[in-house]
Image (cartoon, rainbow, N blue to C red):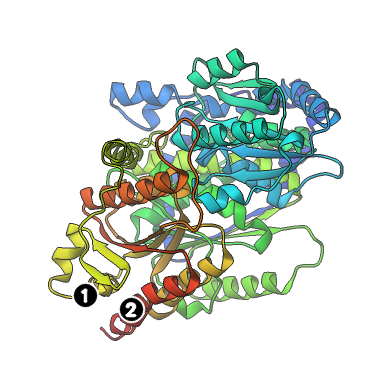
Amino acid sequence: MSSAHDCITRWPALDIARRRDRLQRGYRPSAGRLTPALATYDAAARRTTAGLWRRDVSVWSSDPGVQATIARRLGWLDSPGLMADNLARLTTFADDVRRAGFTDVVLLGMGGSSLAPEVLRAIIGTAPGWLRLHMLDSTDPASVLAVKTDPRATLYIFASKSGTTIEPNSLAAYFRQELEHAGASPWASHFIAITDEGTELEAQARRRQFREVFINPTDIGGRYSALSYFGLVPAALMGQDVAALVGYGLAMFAATEPGEETATPDAVALGVALAAGAQQRHDKLTLLVPAALEPFGLWIEQLVAESTGKHSVGVIPITGETPGPVDVYGDDRLYVRMRLAFPDTPGESEARLDALIDTLQTRQAPVVDITMPEPAALGAEFVRWEVATAVAGALLGINPFDEPNVSQAKEATRVLLTRFKQDGQLTFPPAARRDDDIRFAITEAARVALGDRDPRALFTLLEPSDYVSLLAYLGPDPALAAPLHALRMAVRDRTRHATMFGYGPRYLHSTGQLHKGGPNTGVFVLVSSLPHVDFPIPGEAFSFGTLELAQAIGDFLSLDATGRRALHVHLPDPTPALVERALQPLLASLDEVRNS
């Protein structure tokens, strides 16, 4: 990592010094009940900061094997500088694509390959005359069909670090077929690839002559890749100021450089707060953000959950909860309030969040307040949270750069699909109960804890430190999401437990690691359905609907194998009425939880 002085002198056009000064006025912590604990981390924070800066892998582990693995995952520290040296390539490529007549770009990727571009699209948006971004990170047939662009004017980004991830590979095969049906020839001129060196995707892209191939450094993990080609190629295609994004990223690194001053850099201080919270029963990291920043919460959720959720340790990120009165929140939370210095006139929702924060601080709840000075400061926030997560991992004694449990659900899905190819049907876990055409299955841990009770009484198992996670393998229909969100908010409001929500298979590349590898304090409700419309994946013996359902069952089996308390609800049809009917007994059981 270059020093602040080197960055400022090497890239003077990026205005790094000014941007660093603006950032240093935007971080305001109020530790509350965590104040005594935070003081005990001062020496460790200084050692971690110095070690991070010089890439000392002993900061995270004393095991030589783990150290070797970590050494191959620290490329994110140099990524903004690499992108600063490649700004001309990014902007020239984007100009060429626009002049070629493309109007839309569809990103086919999962997790770290897709969430940062979605944040940039939602918060900064597309400049006039540039390409409209559509992010597709689902195998749900309705989600695939919801991408309604003219293939002849669409560029497809095949984004995969490994090049072997089943979701983008399946989606790429489908859209290649759509291009051929539309008469777009050659179809490969509508595709670009972003991947690591030496992958099968790189070989395929070069063999088939994709429009462009961007090779990302192999030592950058997916969730740490926001300021790399994975994040900045889509940003350039949207006509965003990629130089400003990179400049802010370098400015945050410059603000983190160890110095003589006694103050802990803000990004490090955030990491200390995350670690202290996890160790002092404030492990539910609750993001309070305006509507414009909600997609950023999904990016933070993935970074924190997948990095810290392992070996029965973890920071549990809570995003997407509707803000409520202070009394619906438990005492196990650490709050991060993120606000925008733009637009100049804050809305009513901002005022409600401010009032909630004031009350929380009065009650000595730990709160961190972060203000973004302008949209391009997202570049700094990506780096802030990457540094904070790496620091938290060091202080928690875990490797924040691996994901040891992610392969479990993938392997379970692979086995299910292999059997499907042989038998022509998927194998469901045994049903604990049927309600006409709705199946309910529970994991062994839930069965033992419930005894003879109805499996839909799952929420009666909640303990004070637990959280609830709703996992939905359903299409992008607000009418389907509404009853799930209502149940989620009812859980929080009636029991004060923190809640999570994730769409599958997206969450498998995000919070899935935490669910299986983190503390066993989650209670899970997984909802799946047969699709309204289904269609085959070109070149495969199964359809998108079959793949999606196999992923749902595979994850349920993985939750079972790791001793988690989980309920699988499977519907014959994805209709709001059926979702409501299936969830009603769970909703009713909350009264028993509240009165216990």
* Residue at horizontal 20 percent and vertical 58 percent from the top: 430
- State left or right for residue 5 relative to residue 493: right
Observer-nearest residue: 545 or 107?
A: 545
Q: Amino acid at mark 1?
A: Asp
Q: Is residue 239 above or below residue 574?
A: above
**Residue 166, labelled with which disc?**
none
Crowd class of label 2 (few under 14; some 14 to 19; many from 20; radius 10 Å): some
* Residue indicated by mark 2: 585
* Residue at horizontal 43 percent and vertical 33 percent from the top: 540
- Residue 260, how many percent across, how many down? 58, 34
Observer-nearest residue: 357 or 91?
A: 91
What is the C-alpha distance between the residues marked 2 and 1? 10 Å
Q: Decide: marks 2, 1 in contact (CB < 8 A)?
A: yes
- Residue at disc 2, secondary structure: helix
- State left or right for residue 492 relative to residue 435: right
* Residue indicated by mark 1: 454
Q: Amino acid at mark 2?
A: Pro
- Residue 64, how many percent across, how many down? 30, 21
* Residue at horizontal 40 percent and vertical 80 percent from the top: 494
User: Is residue 575 at least partly visible in the picture?
Assistant: yes
